[in-house]
Amino acid sequence: MGPAPEQEFAQFYDATWPRTLACTYAMTGEIGVAEELAQEAYTRAWARWSQIARYDEPGAWVRQVATRLAVSRWRRSRAARSWQQRHRHVIEVDGPSETSALLITALRQLPEAQRRAIVLHHLADFPVEEVARLEKCPSGTVKARLSRGRAALGEILADPSQNGAPTHA
């Protein structure tokens, strides 16, 4: 008596995954998309495993399904881009102001927790209690992060050499 279908499929999966992934990656050029497509092909194979297991080359069936999924995805995205180009209204957007760029540069220099607190409270307009809920910490901790973050931002923005702005010596 042979291995159970689950065990047989797991062995098949382990043996054929690298080649299937290589095929989908070669078609898409994006590893995340390739993994999704390959996984979908194996999901479809598992649903029909009792039949596919009897094929001479079940791995070829999976690769064929995966590559067809890649082609379908490509066609859908091409059709979507085409529709977008015909129906999209182009809106010109100015780049960030010098002040915004300096603020972003300064925010990047803060510790992550302080940066999140500042952004959530001052830019996203969340009250301290909501920031605390999102950060899963007491509101006192958020207040301390805000205080320290504002103080650090004040120092960074007051000293042009820290924020990438040209200095005048």
Image (spheres, rainbow, N blue to C red):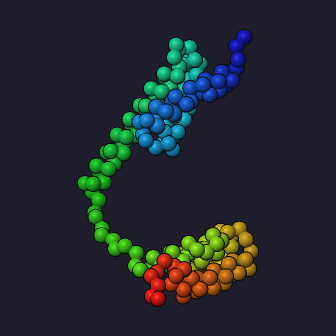
Question: Which of the pair 44/101 is nearer the observer?
Answer: 101
- The residue under the point 48% across, 21% down is 60
Q: Is residue 120 above or below residue 8?
A: below
Circle count: 0
The answer to whether residue 73 shows anywhere in this view is yes
Q: Position of residue 5 (x, y in %)?
A: 66, 21
Position of 41 compared to 127: left or right?
left
Q: Position of residue 148 (x, y in %)?
A: 67, 82
Which residue occupies the extreme front position in the image? 169
Q: Is residue 158 above or below residue 127?
A: below
The image quadrant that residue 98 belongs to is bottom left
The answer to whether residue 130 shows anywhere in this view is no
Q: Position of residue 101 (x, y in %)?
A: 45, 76
- The residue under the point 59% across, 86% down is 155
Dividing the image into 4 quarters, which one contains the N terminus? Answer: top right
Q: Position of residue 41 (x, y in %)?
A: 51, 31
Position of 141 compared to 106: left or right?
right
Question: Which of the pair 18/94 is nearer the observer?
Answer: 18
